[in-house]
Amino acid sequence: MNHVSAGLTSLKTTLVEFAVRYGLQILGASVIVFVGLKAAGYLTRMLDAWLEKRTTIDVALRTLLVRLLRLVVVGATIVIAAEKIGVPVASLIAGLGVAGVGIGLAMQGVLSNLIAGMTIFFLKPFKVGEYIDVLKEHGEVVDITLFSTTLRHTDQSLIVIPNRQISGEILHNYGTKRQLDIEIGIAYASDIGKAIDVATETVLADPRVLREPAPLIGIRKVGDAVLTISARPWVPVPDFEQAHLGLYRALVEAFREHGVDMPFPQREIRVVHAETGATRAVLGAPVVKVN
């Protein structure tokens, strides 16, 4: 019991001495950390609100700047708090610098993504909400981070591409709108002017179709049995699939309503009898020639 009591007394004495010697430093460091974190939150909210009013700054760049400010404020808070409790900050920074070299060599891929992400943020080859095609992948840009870019395909699946794969590649940016390519065949006997007018009226009646740039509508192909009417309007990226399906139906119904003939394939087949040379016409059958 005496040994236990002596041990407890010694521990108590040690804790009291530690509290007397370092208590004020620890309390001061705790206050610094508390105030620093509060300041980081307040400053980042102010910066975010200020940047949000600047329409020229996109969401991804705004998020990056807010995160960098928070990182700087929190880092400065930690350094000041460490110095308050007696940690040799200069030696610590030097040690972190040496360790950073080794970490950098081990994380070359991550650093490449980081540098590429910074390039994307500041050069802005694309923005959130735009439709791009890169590395044989395509979709709407839904998120840009320092390390990767996320695309949403038309089937709602997500494609995450490391930024280092995007940087330096040929990139097709459709922007916030895409052009539909719709083709419908009409008979040669149809009134071409009427067909184009009906197609134009039908396309412009769809609220998803943009008025600027104006839709391109006219004869696209001259085939063996049909004239192909082409309608190429622009629609916002999110409406691409629904507008594509809806306009096909609307055009077919409009052509039927206005008497624009849409022929189905027909063939006239002549079968020549080998002995008599007689010829008989058969509709809808393949050409058969008997020698």
Image (spheres, rainbow, N blue to C red):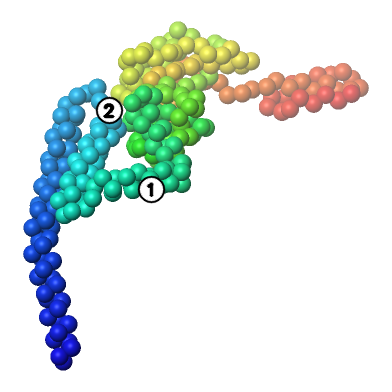
Q: Residues within 10 Å of mark 1 (few under 14, many from 20)?
A: few
In the rendered image, the vertical position of residue 203 relative to residue 43, given as above or below:
above
Tag shown at residue 58: 2
Residue 160 placement (x, y as % from top left): 43, 41
**Secondary element type, mark 2:** loop
Say if residue 196 shows up in the picture.
Answer: yes
Q: Which residue type carries mark 2?
A: Asp
> Would you name the residue on which mark 1 appears?
99
Give the residue at x 45% y 17%. Answer: 231
Residue 117 position by quadrant: top left
Is residue 53 left or right of 93 when viewed as pictured?
left
Residue 30 percent across, percent down from the top left: 12, 54
Residue at 89% x, 20% y is: 276
Residue 20 appears left or right of 155: left
Quadrant where the image shows the N terminus: bottom left
The percent position of residue 8, horizontal first and vertical second, equals: 14, 81
Q: Relative to 35, say whether 240 is above or below.
A: above
Residue 216: x, y in percent?
43, 13
What whole-number distance in Å separates the C-alpha atoms at marks 2 and 1?
35 Å
Secondary structure beneath dot 1 equals helix
- The dot on residue 214 is none
Looking at numbered disc 1 in the image, what kind of residue is underneath it? Ala
Of badges 2 and 1, nearer the viewer stands 1
Give the camera-side residue of 94 and 258.
94
Give the residue at x 70% y 20%: 268
> Which is nearer the eye, 152 or 225?
152
Query: Which residue corresponds to the image point at 58% horizontal and 24% vertical from the top-left?
Result: 264
- Between 168 and 257, the one lying in front of the other is 168
